Amino acid sequence: MTDGDVMRDSSGRAADSDSPPDSPLALRAHRTNLVNVPAAVLCSEAYNDEPRRLRIGATRSEHAALFEALDESPDALTASDIFQRHMAEVFGVNPDFSGTEGPDGKRRFRASYLRLLKGWMFDSNRAEGAVLKGWVESRFGLLPTYHGEPIRRFASDAWTAYGEQKQSTRFHNNNIHLQLDLLYEFCQWTIRRGWPDAPMPNWASHIRLYRGVNDFEEHHIVARPDKRTAVLRLNNLCSFSINRDIAGQFGDYILDAWVPLPKVIFFRDILPRYPFQGEGEYLVIGGDYRVGVSLL
């Protein structure tokens, strides 16, 4: 929606006025976010070249007992169990989706980060994906550019459909954003812990990941220096694979990127007891990425 010359999103917040009012959504960002790096910086190539660690508000201090217990864990499996027990205690979220028992003895199925992850991996353009993209929008200030179809303007059917789905009461309850805040912080804690079998050493700043695409419809092309290189504004949340061959199953073109580790919100190894192992999938915060482009 608009208010005079000020463009506002579906929550009534002003978008970045530094961009021309008719610029595509892909080139815009919220003025504020809940992390220690402004959205305009976070979505830039410069941030990806020299990333800074991100913290979502006071999430770690508010759950200090969890991270103290994690620091004492001897291995990744124990750490995962500690995390999931904490989520069950605080949010009534059980790994088996069994819900929690109410005063009447009936089970209550509540929105959970696990259901969102499962839904995303089945189809990132459903309501679960919209809730996850909405969380990235809220916490990191990056706007989605694709949800079932390209989102090019605030005043568009695509933006309206996304806004309706991200507020879906089926998934947008039980403090779902706070659950995702903890999932992100746990993911980042795991990356910095440096387990012997981790996919990256604890001193690393980036990880090389791959994404298969058939065309560039989902991505705004910022620059195309040559046939083998592109600078793309990726969707505010997107999937990569650590395995190039697996990425090739999703498109004829392979994008490879050095992803800054603070932009990783979830990957297969942080919940080893849960069946998210199949595609070596990494959920990554978007923005401008310089990617290599190659054909299968």
Image (cartoon, rainbow, N blue to C red):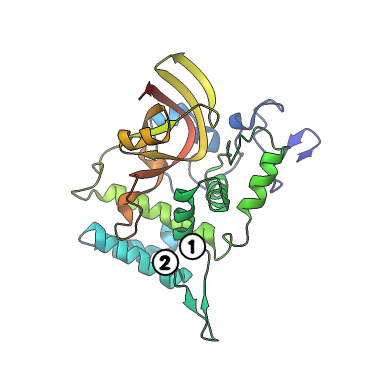
Q: Position of residue 205 (x, y in %)?
A: 31, 36
Q: Position of residue 39 (x, y in %)?
A: 54, 37
Camera-side residue of 264 and 6: 264
Marks 1/2 in contact by CB < 8 Å: the verdict is: yes
Looking at the image, is mark 1 or mark 2 nearer the viewer? 1
Residue to which mark 1 is pinned? 112
Rendered residue at 25%/57% (across/down): 76
Q: Secondary structure at mark 1?
A: loop
Q: What is the count of numbered marks?
A: 2
Q: Position of residue 253 (x, y in %)?
A: 41, 26
The residue singled out by tag 2 in the image is 87
Local SS, label 2: helix
Q: Nearer the viewer, residue 68 or 78?
A: 78
Separation (CA) of disc 1 from disc 2 = 9 Å
Numbered mark located on residue 286 in the image: none
- Residue density around tag 1, few if under 14, some if 14–19, many if 20 or more, within 10 Å: many
Amino acid at pointer 1 = Ser
| Badge 2 amino acid | Met
Residue occupying image coordinates x 39% and y 42%: 262
Name the image quarter holding the N terminus. top right
N-terminal of the pair, mark 1 or mark 2, is: 2
